[in-house]
Amino acid sequence: MKLTILFGGASFEHEISIVSAVTLKEKLQNRFELSFVFCDSQHNFYLIEPSSMKAKTFSSGEYKKAPLLTLARSRFVHQKMFKKIEIDGTVLNLIHGADGEEGVIAGLLDFYSFSYIGPRVDASVFSFDKRYTKWLCEAKGVKTIKYDVLYANEHKDIEFSYPVIVKPARLGSSIGVSVVKESEEMDYALDVAFEFDSAVIVEPFIEGVKEYNLAGYVANGELHFSIVEEPQKHEFLDFEKKYMDFSRSEGPSAAQIDDILLNKLKEAFKTIYLDMFEGALIRCDFFVIDDEVYLNEINPIPGSMANYLFEDFPSVIESLASSLPHKKRVRVGYEYIHSISQAKGK
Amino acid sequence: MKLTILFGGASFEHEISIVSAVTLKEKLQNRFELSFVFCDSQHNFYLIEPSSMKAKTFSSGEYKKAPLLTLARSRFVHQKMFKKIEIDGTVLNLIHGADGEEGVIAGLLDFYSFSYIGPRVDASVFSFDKRYTKWLCEAKGVKTIKYDVLYANEHKDIEFSYPVIVKPARLGSSIGVSVVKESEEMDYALDVAFEFDSAVIVEPFIEGVKEYNLAGYVANGELHFSIVEEPQKHEFLDFEKKYMDFSRSEGPSAAQIDDILLNKLKEAFKTIYLDMFEGALIRCDFFVIDDEVYLNEINPIPGSMANYLFEDFPSVIESLASSLPHKKRVRVGYEYIHSISQAKGK
């Protein structure tokens, strides 16, 4: 089976995407005919040889010698005088953060009718912006932590007592996130967060809260789940720790939880996923407080596709790639123009 | 000032978009250096001569003789042996319905760093799908009519008494919409709506409800409003009537309403628009029941840009084009790859 790994992008998580792509090469190369398409910060596409899939290829700028690709219907194309390369496999969108997760890449892939693994435009919007994730959960009846939104150049007092956690509304991978223990630290934390976004989310920070991560996807009309992971505990995962996480390929053991909690986690995942995330393998990060499940975050393109949470990851990607949603083709006709032209005598 | 009108698209509203484009040519040609880029149902772009901007050019297939365009950074390009045409003006996204209003065109224009008039990706998602418009209003405290969502292949009883109005969740211009007066007619109305979408919105139909339309946009940091229009009353505007509406270039007189209601309408518009629709000129369609304002629909690319609601439409487009939002450029670096490479000894 052909599979095109699309990675890079003009985002703060550009490097993370490279690490994810290198990890997926190792996990998938024995079962797939892989192509690697790198999107640089200028939005040029390059075809990278599998043997060049090393972080150094990108950090050194060496990638610029690779063939430049353009977009065509369902394929990337490299055209030279006497040579035409066509990359026409199913695309796996592995561009983390902006571009990849905000709906821009989804729009591009939809426009060019690619078959692709990854969130669609609406799923991207609802998972990328933490404010809209709250709206989604509210509408679907999934609990989230109470929150407040602050905007740059707006003065507003926080409703919660400290400690609080401060996050840019639209960034992943803990970039710009701070835990604030007392009011004196708040201004600095807000300055940091507003460096990245004009909207900032503030939530109470719950010391020692139980966290569980669960990944899943729909294939062949059924929802399939990963094991539940209890992520390693830090105050919160900062960028460097999360970053290391993106190169993970070894699995944790499943969290020790009872069936009641397991079912609650799966139920919340299902409620969020269905009718929104079809086509994507997502990871939902949950909090559990007094036996109640709260959604913390939706990762519509999790680091290294959360491969380490699945026993047979290549089969996961195979079955997902075989049952991707495709847009209904719209028949375009000119009946109304004809009738209007007649009515207007033109 | 250069302005590129982008129209057509693979949508049920393809023809409507052509009519809108022809209307805008008439309204804007004296003040702008206009280019016309047609997107056909196969997603090819063609450069159409202003003199060929007639419905017949498209319905006859004649447009296929026009120069084919490809996308490049902030421009459309036609490349022939000894000739290169570049279309590099601000784009006005005039693709109504799917493609244009669902976030796909926004993603494409964002990816290629175009300066454009039109809804951004998130604004598109929240206005195109009527379910998400309800969520937006709920979150922002703007009233809407109570509603129910039905899905194809699901049996569910309606909570409201008849008459009700049945609408596909993701289509504009009244396509697939029915007013259902009694339960016997319901199955047929649902069949029609499910032809167009897998999700259908059902709302109570309020006979004789007052309707008001208001358009507006942000330019130079300020919100500017059109006059308020009381649309002509039919049971509801069906596709053909709305269609005629898209070629409108003559203004109605402002609705006779008092300042209290006017301010309520403006306040609701402002709440919806700010921090979501910047860059777009939108028209909000409201209901008024017992002096309370309810949002019915957001049109992020209204028919012929609601030109007829503004006294000096060319100046509206000029000021909007001069203050479009642009994405912050993300600096891509390789610091983490370097530190991780060292940590891993690679």
Image (cartoon, coloured by chain):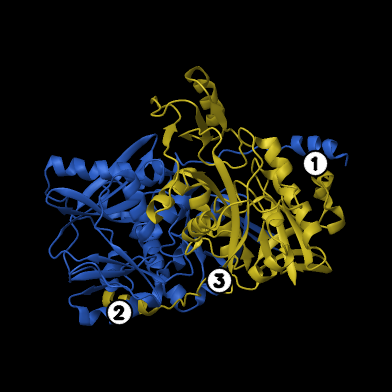
Chain colours: A blue, B yellow
**x and y percentages locating residue A204 in the rendered image:** 21, 65
Q: Mark 1 against mark 3, which lies toward the viewer?
A: 3
The residue sitting at the top extreme is: B184
Q: Decide: few, some or many residues near mark 3? Use Cα within 10 Å; few <14, some 14-19, many ≥20.
A: few
State whether residue B264 is above or below residue A43. above
Q: CA distance from mark 2 to mark 1?
A: 62 Å
Chain letter for the residue marked with disc 1 in the picture: B
Q: Which residue position holds label 2?
A: B342
Location of residue A337 by image quarter: top right
The residue at 13%/48% (across/down) is A291
Label 3 amino acid? Glu
Q: Earlier in the sequence, mark 1 or mark 3?
A: 1
The C terminus of chain B: image quadrant = bottom left
Q: Are marks 2 and 1 in contact (CB under 8 Å)?
A: no
**x and y percentages locating residue B138 in the rendered image:** 39, 50
Chain letter for the residue marked with disc 2 in the picture: B
Taking the image as shown, residue A216 lies to the left or right of residue A101, namely: left
Taking the image as shown, residue B175 lies to the left or right of residue B203, namely: right
Find residue B59 and name its label. 1
Q: Which residue position holds label 3?
A: B222
**x and y percentages locating residue A276 in the rendered image:** 41, 45
Work out whether disc 1 and disc 3 sit on a shared chain.
yes
Label 2 amino acid? Gln
Work out whether disc 2 and disc 1 sit on a shared chain.
yes
The residue at 35%/61% (across/down) is A23
Q: CA distance from mark 2 to mark 3?
A: 51 Å
